[in-house]
Amino acid sequence: MSGPPAVWQAAGPVLAPLAVALAAISIIVAAAGENPAAALRTLAAGSLGSREGLAMTLFYTTDFIFAGLAVSVAFRAGLFNIGVEGQAMAAGIGIALAALYAGALPGALALPALALAGAAGGALWALVPAWLQARRGSHIVITTIMFNFIAGALLGFLLNGPLGAPGSMQPESPAFPAAAAMPRLDDALRAMGMTPTDTPLNLCLPLALAAAFAAHVLFERTRLGYEMAVLGASPPAAAYAGISPARIMMLAMILSGILGSGLALNELTGAQNRLILEFTGGYGFVGIAIALTGRNRPAGIVLAALLFGALYQGGAELAFERPKITRDMIVLVQGLIVLMAGCFGARARSGEA
Amino acid sequence: MVPALEFIGVTKRFGGVAACNGVSFQAAQGSIHGIIGENGAGKSTLMSILCGARRADAGHIRLDGRAVNFASPRGAIARGIGMVHQHFMLIEAMSVLDNIMLGAEGGPLLAKGRAAARARLAALERDHGPAVDPDAIIADLPVGLRQRVEILKALIRGARILVLDEPTAVLTPNETAELFKLMRRLRDGGACILFITHKLGEALDVCGRVTVMRRGGIVGEFDTAQTSAARLAEAMIGRPVEAAANDRIRAPGAVILRARDVRVSDPSGAARVKGVSLDLREGEILGIAGVSGNGQSELLEALAGMRPIAAGTLAINGAAIDARARNPRAMRALGVMHVPEDRLKHGLVADFPASGSAMLGFHREARYGGALLDRAAIEADCAAKMARWDIRPPAPNLATRGFSGGNQQKLILAREIERDPLILLVGQPTRGVDIGAVEAAHARLLALRAAGKAILLISNELDEILALSDRILVMCGGRITGERSPGGTSARELGLLMAGAADTAA
């Protein structure tokens, strides 16, 4: 079968909705009484036009890659994980506990320990709904949504109590020790004698790209990925093939929770350096949109994350420079992109059949 | 006389492929006209045009000499076309009467429409013999009666041309005989019936004339009085058919699989297999006949490890299979391979490329790679199977759903048989596949038996059971109701056992 090259196959579902989204932005901006061309220029310049803008775009992209991968790995196995947000919060608690109570670790071991603690927190938070689905038949969409609320409440309790910074009125933990800070792009720039960007872009970006590659290998080249895909595509066929649904569901959700923990690692060790409320910023939910737009393929997810990262950063600039345009409009545009990706994706699928 | 129904040069293309290509034939009032052909020959497309579901690209249809061109199924129904689909379109929780008036209620209040429908049903019963109790709930009716409700539904809407799409596929031989009686009465009453089938014997039995389709065109029209099944089959597939020679000369070997008092319940707890004992010997094909829904499927899946066994024992070569080993993976390791009844639900993953389906269940084996799957090896394995089994198109990367039913089935047979089974469990090996694939499947099963393997065959096709089996067990209501040898029984006798008649044989 001859088809378009693989790169285009991954990029097509992202680029086509982008074109529609830009047209939609223009109309919305014009309706708000601003000049669409100027707004688009601001959007592009704010997200890609400067070193700072680009670095912030890539910082958001890192969050979105992790969140998108987390959704997609569960979706492969037929599970709709709405709980990436809560899993990232649980991962954040794990990271904070490790940072605050195991601070005596030597520098080189501190960050891997934090990452492991975060992964454990995310995996644990994903494992309970997975177990409930596999053994008790509780629908994972419902349980993961509920676990988001539980994680949020737990985070609030911890920050107002045991993990709260002494003497602070804010719901936040004490600052992490210096060894718990992820190396930043700025550190490298300073070392090379260049001007720092004053952005939190950090080592988590290459980590996210490595995770995307690992997810690609998992999906395409491993037996676990094959069994997940069989279960996701046809549970009866999985039963016929002797694939244990419970085992695959739990493994897929554990992996999903671990990937979601990358979001917490990026935000807490890269930007905040403390545990705060709502550090997840709803990015766990954006992961659903990323996975849909990227059509559940790691390459597509990276591209979709870049697109959403640019919209986030450019949108913030736009709202700052032109008060008539609010961030809600950017959310509207994101919604349109997901909708368009759904439409284009459906068309591509019916074309395949 | 003007024919009741006439196709004139009807052509329908999908993409570049002509599903129907200049189809012309006539069917007279008061006749049963057979349309036979393999899957993909264009029968269904032709009927969908007649019923208004699709529009022809060229050509037209005449009813009683007047050209018609239906824009929708509603238009076709209004002109007296009645379609009885292979899969019933009935609402199980509703009564016969309510199903019959569905879509023709005659106003917002039901009482008047109900009374009218009841009166028309009574009239139909008077004209065509025993009908169905109008107040019975569909879910309580056997398949044969449900089909009758579908036919009554069409008649009550004034159908003069009745299309029956593979109506006997779900019936017992006795129900089939009842259906044919009804069809003949309707014919004598002046109806024009189009009977679509792939069972040549039935076409010869009940039809006056038979039109044979192949690759979208008509390849012949035969008077049933002056033709034979062999000639029809030859026209259908374009070459002489070689029935697989079945020489049952071997003495049965040692018992390979022994099942004693096996009981299986469905997930809701209802007993589906109620104490079945059987011995499967090496070098034999043990056929299990039965109307679908009488526990054969559950028995097959339980033996394959897909369903838990509630009670009873299993042993392979004398060694008991304990509950821990009763799962598909462990059973495969013991040499029990399984060709499932529903190939698209269980046997394959429709969305996967063929190569992905060709390793389903065996994907853990080292031949497909070490820690990482070896794409090239997987595709080469699939390509080799395709070459050995003549699977077309030979494209390992094509989506599984893109293959015809016969080629999908060959892919499953290749996967299971090439893994050198000790025991092969086979469910409906030729359901919905073309004659070429039937020949291939039967020949491979007989060759496997000749190699000394033990084969358990479940099929709704009595002809298939009779042609292949060395022994036949009949199941009804979850129990074995009789055992026969294929030489010493008839389809009629098996049909009675399948319907639950007590076994009176000595």
Image: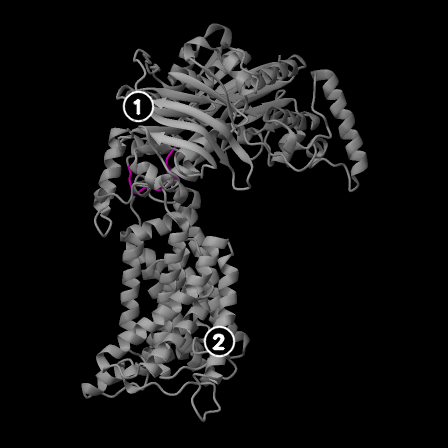
Is residue B383 placed above or below B424 in the rendered structure?
Answer: below
Under circle 2, the secondary element is helix
Question: Which residues are the magenta region?
Answer: B395-404
Is residue B460 placed above or below A35 in the rendered structure?
Answer: above
**Separation of residues labelled 2 and 1 (CA atoms):** 63 Å
Along the line of sight, the residue nearer the viewer: B39 or A20: B39
What's the residue type where badge 2 is placed?
A: Leu
* Residue at the image position 51 percent from the left and 79 percent from the top: A326
Left or right of A195 in this view: B74: right
Give the x, y percent position of residue B212: 45, 18
Do badges 2 and 1 share one subunit? no
Give the x, y percent position of residue A194: 21, 87
The reply to whether discs 2 and 1 touch (Cβ–Cβ < 8 Å) is no
Residue A80: within the magenta? no
Instruction: Work out which quarter of the rendered image holds the C terminus of chain A and state it.
Output: top left
Q: Which mark is residue B444?
A: 1
Residue A17 showing in the rendered view? no
What's the residue type where badge 1 is placed?
A: Arg
Q: Which residue is mark 2?
A: A154
Along the line of sight, the residue nearer the viewer: B406 or B295: B295
Under circle 1, the secondary element is helix
Q: Main secondary structure of the magenta part?
A: loop
